[in-house]
Amino acid sequence: MKLVFLGIGGTLPTRDRNLSSVAVEIGKIRFLLDCGEGTQKQLMKSNFSYMKLDAIFLSHFHGDHILGIPGLLQTLSLNSRQKELYIIGPPGTVKLIQAMEEISFYSRSFPLHVAEVSPGESFTLFGVKVDTLASEHSLPGLIYRLSEPTPKRVLSRDAIREVAKKKGVSPGELYREYMEKLERGEDVDEELLGVSKPGRVLVYTGDTAYFPGLLDFSKGVDVLISEATFPSEMGERAKEWGHMTVAQAAKLGRDAEVRYLFLVHFSPRIKGEEGVEEVRREAKAIFPRAVVPEELAEYVIKKRR
Ligand SMILES: [Zn+2]
Ligand SMILES: [Zn+2]
């Protein structure tokens, strides 16, 4: 699983921060979590191909999470994209995307499937299981949990290497040959099979205040991408506006015992690089595995051993 944080700013862009969007690669599947204004330019600067994008998940309809969609759809069409694209969001998403398609003239070159999901609903998209939970924000919104499937059968690299050595063939080629057999559902010698590691699980909070259900929803996941809008001294304001503070988000990651906690969606009140550095220090003091990501840096999440 690969993550690219395209924007870690919340509410407004700043000189050094872009608006909400995370690119996620799970195997061959590519998702965007939210699509704030400027997302397509950030995608162009990353190694993540927007032409290969499979789906966009929207947490809610505040502009800092969705205003990148019309421009991105038009760019995909101008590049003659043929591949279908899914947009998933809370109730109202169909009307929203319809309005976005009408605000300027363009002719879409690819099929677009827009689906509305009610909080609590679960579904599977490209083999990835998606669970949802209602957020506590000033607008209705969804918190997403994406679970990668756990493969039923996997190959043992050691066993393949040994067979390749005996046969005098390249281990890479032999591996591919047997992988194709597994994919076709054919029988493969038991000795060549290894231990199947559990698929990775990611939770994306979007914008939300802290509430206990969020802790249960995130319990033990591999990756928690949590909003951390406000500095920790602004707890009252955060609750009132449906956001979390840095300390609340760090405690959420710690108490949920996640493998990696990424903090995003910083208010412009957290000023410049020094502000972000302060957030990083504070979050790590509460939960050492907290990460304040660099925009456009790539984070690879390996499976648990
Ligand atoms: Zn926001
Ligand atoms: Zn919001």
Image: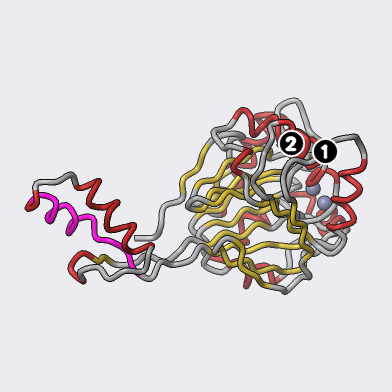
Instruction: Assess disc 2: are there few (<14), some (14-19) or many (≥20) residues with their C-alpha within 10 Å of its C-alpha.
Output: some
Q: Residue at x 76, y 70 (%)?
A: 119
Q: Are the residues flagged by discs 2 and 1 in contact, CB closer than 8 Å? A: yes
Dot 1: element: loop
Q: In the visual, does 35 lie left or right of 284?
A: right
Dot 2: element: helix
Q: How many numbered marks, from 0 up?
A: 2
Residue 262 position in % (x across, y down): 59, 49
Q: In the visual, does 143 lie left or right of 251?
A: right
- Magenta run includes residue 130: no
Q: Which residue is drawn at 58% across and 48% down?
A: 30
Q: Which residue is drawn at 26% across and 52% down?
A: 175
Q: Nearer the viewer, residue 292 or 286?
A: 292
Q: Distance between the residues labelled 2 and 1?
A: 7 Å
Residue picked out by circle 2: 77
Q: Residue at x 48, y 61 (%)?
A: 200
Residue picked out by circle 1: 107
Looking at the rendered structure, the kind of residue marked 1 is: Ser
Magenta segment, which residues?
153-165
Look at the picture and state if 28 lies above or below 209. Answer: above
**Is tag 2's residue or tag 1's residue first in the polypeptide sequence?**
2
Look at the picture and state if 252 lies above or below 80. Answer: below
Residue 204 position in % (x across, y down): 65, 57
Looking at the rendered structure, the kind of residue marked 2 is: Ser
- Magenta run includes residue 164: yes
